[in-house]
Image: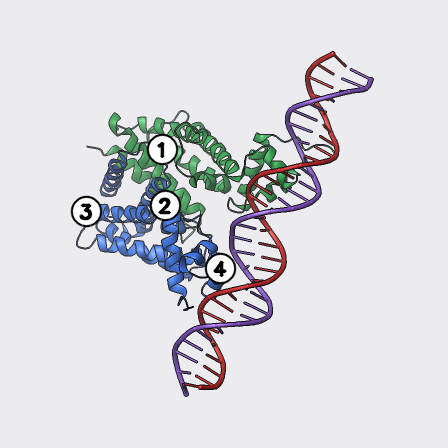
Chain colours: A green, B blue, C purple, D red
Amino acid sequence: MPRAGLDRSSVIAAGADLADEIGFVALSMGALAQRVGVRTPSLYKHVENQADLNRAIATLALTEAGAAMGAAIQGLAGRDALAAAAHALRSFALEHPGRYAATVSFEPLSPDDPLALAAAEGLRPLRAVLQGYDVAPEQSTHALRAVRSMFHGFASIQSTGGFRWADDIDDSFEWLIDLVDRGLRSQN
Amino acid sequence: MPRAGLDRSSVIAAGADLADEIGFVALSMGALAQRVGVRTPSLYKHVENQADLNRAIATLALTEAGAAMGAAIQGLAGRDALAAAAHALRSFALEHPGRYAATVSFEPLSPDDPLALAAAEGLRPLRAVLQGYDVAPEQSTHALRAVRSMFHGFASIQSTGGFRWADDIDDSFEWLIDLVDRGLRSQN
DNA sequence: CACCCAAAGCTAATGCTGTTAGTTTCTAGC
DNA sequence: GCTAGAAACTAACAGCATTAGCTTTGGGTG
């Protein structure tokens, strides 16, 4: 019998993929072991426990989502950049529901935690978008939190099926982007 | 030995209180049984299973949160009403983290589900707030979803400790309210 | 080329879940 | 006071994450 040849990153990637397929809450050590062709306890050679796995999936997802937003806003500014970033984030949440769900549930973490670093890094594209608007420097944190709250809230509600009439959700998302754009431009 | 004298609503209320204290994810049938002074299997006389319990807690929380918002906006309009509703919702999320967490995790539901009805009912105060702004009737759904997304996103991120510098979170929330208010007023 | 040891995988076992079946006990209404 | 029926109990099971200890594999070194 040949060996499976796993390591930490391959286990985490497989866990993220499996979570996207069957749902983050349904992700179990047994299911993941079966997926990678190994018995359950063998996973503990690569991952400390399930909490460690979950945090690692969240870290991966934040990095990927940030990269997607960064790529989407290349060469754009103002409303175009805002819309591109928003769409990239929402697409990521819808195409990778397991990864996205992993990012929403975690306890307070120390500032040098890899998960916290990935979160901060993933927000950089959003910061760049806000520089295209006239926000006073001391308000940039407020603006970032506001934009982040809105897009996260929308993606979160939609990805859990929280909107009633499915047909015009895309229109609602455009409307939200316009609302934010108007609010950011009409300061003072 | 006297009997505990439970019924469905008292079990659900106790579950909601316990979730607020120890966290929604830590809420187990065993912990709840101990809390109400009964052995674990006895709970199944009042509740179908844990999923049923969780949905019932979510329904209760949505009803309570909607009532809090409705009470908060009494006699107010415009920006005052918007701020009052936002503060009421965020206070609810922070004072009842277990209840609030119960509302975010559920699968797609049928339109006549009690949970869906409670969600729709709880949104009525927000609808009332939006009537104080000049939104075209065919855009009222978009506006409602936008406002809901923003406040839910902010409350969700804050209640899971997602903001880095704790000191000026209240300022950020005020800033968010202003952003929404400006966006809603500057249409066309 | 053979050895060897560290890592990778395995089996077995434990304790904690949610849940069901079957039994006993309390209590409200006649 | 008797009696249904509800409310609580004990016993048991399956699935979960996790740990301990054993076996095997394969890459680097002599």
Q: Could you say whether the residue bearing mark 4 is in a helix, strand or loop? A: helix
Q: Which mark is residue B2?
A: none
Residue type pointed to by label 2: Ser
Residue type pointed to by label 4: Thr
The chain identifier of the residue carrying mark 3 reads B
Residue type pointed to by label 3: Asp
* Viewer-side label of 2, 3: 3
- Residue at x-position 28% and y-position 29%: A140
User: Do the residues indicated by labels 1 and 3 lie within the same chain of the protein?
Assistant: no
Q: Circle 4 sits on which residue?
A: B40
Horizontal side of A172 relative to B107 (left or right) equals left
Q: Gap between marks 2 and 1, in whole Å? A: 15 Å
- Residue at x-position 39% and y-position 30%: A123
User: Do the residues indicated by labels 3 and 4 lie within the same chain of the protein?
Assistant: yes
Q: Circle 3 sits on which residue?
A: B80
The residue furthest left is B75
In the rendered image, the quadrant that contains the C terminus of chain B is top left
User: Do the residues indicated by labels 2 and 3 lie within the same chain of the protein?
Assistant: no
- Give the image location of residue B132, x and y in percent: 21, 50
In this view of the protein, which residue sits in the foreground, A103 or A3?
A: A3
Q: Earlier in the sequence, mark 2 or mark 1?
A: 1
Q: Circle 1 sits on which residue?
A: A82
In this view of the protein, which residue sits in the foreground, A111 or A31?
A: A111
- Give the image location of residue A78, x and y in percent: 33, 29
